[in-house]
Image (cartoon, rainbow, N blue to C red):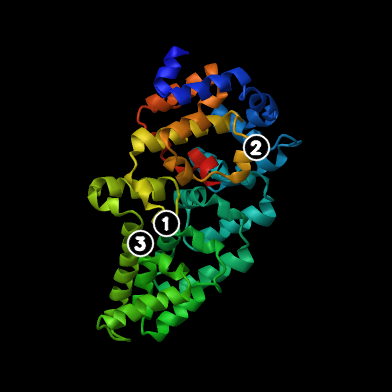
Amino acid sequence: MQFLASLVSNSRNFRRRWNRALSLHHFSWNAREASEPNAVFVEFLRDNGFQKPQAMAIAMRYPNLKSLEQPRSVIQMLKSYSFSDTQIQKSIRVHPQMMFYKVEKNLEPKLRFFEEIGFSGSDLGKFVSQHSSGIGISLVRKMIPTVEILKSIVAPKHEHLTVILSRCGWLLGRDPNLFLLPNISYLKTCGIVGSQLASLLRRQPRIFNVPEEKLRGYVSRALELGFNLNSRMLVHAVLSLSSLNEITDIIRRSPGLIRCAEDKLTLGFEFYMKRMGIEREALVKRPCVLMYNLEKRVIPRLKVLQILRERGLLLKEEKKKKKKMFDIVEMTEEANLEKYVVRFGDETAEELLVAYKSHLLNNDDDADSSCSSHEDCSLITD
């Protein structure tokens, strides 16, 4: 206990709260009430390559599962489309509900559709595993209309379609009548058509997912700077201004970023956007997280939460709140340790603290790479 207390904090108030937590056993009811995983389902997942903690975490979501017929048919279908074991596991970790979709009615039509638009073999498995939550999106009402619109822009080079969707698969889940179609129509009235429109879509697809008023603002600013409608240079101005606008917002919200090294910012953007699946807009709104040390602060906290999730030790109200990653990253050291470590007491807390301080989980040697994909910390972004 002295070892644990010395590692946590030297604060008198903190030690007092720590001792009170132990005496009242705040942690015990939570462990007792944790749902028991379906043993048969756990074994099924283990047989399909899942680590035991991952299998238990998924099985806990479906304690009343009576039959494995549906999950088994889904996995068989994915294998028939040449998904690797890793891609299957990643797809299910990101979106466990995928195992219960009807194969002939829901899953296979979408896999065929993805093949028809250019994804095949390992590329198909990679795309679906990165966007498996999209399997639940309506094929008729959203996917097909969106793809037809994108095809009309990038034709005849349809190979660009897979590039665009690989970067922004979320486009398939949005109503194309909300932003995509109005923004395309407006850009065309400005003379941005054909290859210019296709280039803008490839380089800055997110500009097609903003309110039309915001897009008009970029064009107006470009005109104020001396660019002309129907000029081939207008598209470059709009592209630059949309990027500059993000940078301006970031600096305004967190001026200290100016002092950060370029390598640190680049690593931060890569971690949050590519590895954790955080959208650019969300990062622009909370840019101060880019200033935190990934190895010493961010990743250890996510690892502790991963352990708690796998063991079913998160409070019910915490699950309902769906605690956002940025909130957890921004918490003070004392508040974070008290909320997610010391409340569990004695052996559990000591184990959590060791994992936190050593930055290790599941025998990972590299703290940064150990959290290399957002599904590993799904409790934060769910």
Q: In what element is the residue under mark 3?
A: helix
Mark 2, residue position: 316
The amino acid sitting under disc 3 is: Asp
Mark 3, residue position: 249
Query: Pointer 1: residues within 10 angstroms few (<14), some, or many (20+)?
Result: few
Mark 1, residue position: 285
Q: Is residue 175 left or right of residue 196?
A: right
Q: Is residue 86 left or right of residue 299?
A: right
| x and y percentages locating residue 279 in the rendered image | 44, 55
For the residue pair 223 and 5, the one nearer the viewer reads as 5
For the residue pair 123 and 256, the one nearer the viewer reads as 256
Q: Is residue 301 left or right of residue 40?
A: left
As drawn, the residue found furthest toward the front would be 12
The amino acid sitting under disc 1 is: Lys
The amino acid sitting under disc 2 is: Lys
Spatial CA span between label 3 and label 2: 36 Å
- Give the mark nearer the N terminus: 3 vs 2: 3
Do labels 1 and 2 touch, CB within 8 Å? no
Q: Residue at x 53, y 39 (%)?
A: 89
Q: Quadrant of residue 247?
A: bottom left
Q: Residue at x 66, y 34 (%)?
A: 60
| x and y percentages locating residue 366 in the rendered image | 35, 30
Query: Pointer 3: residues within 10 angstroms few (<14), some, or many (20+)?
Result: some
- Total count of labels: 3
| x and y percentages locating residue 81 in the rendered image | 55, 48
Do labels 3 and 1 touch, CB within 8 Å? yes
The answer, for residue 195, to whether it is visible in the render is: no
Q: Is residue 132 left or right of residue 213?
A: right
| x and y percentages locating residue 258 in the rendered image | 25, 53
Q: In what element is the residue under mark 2?
A: helix
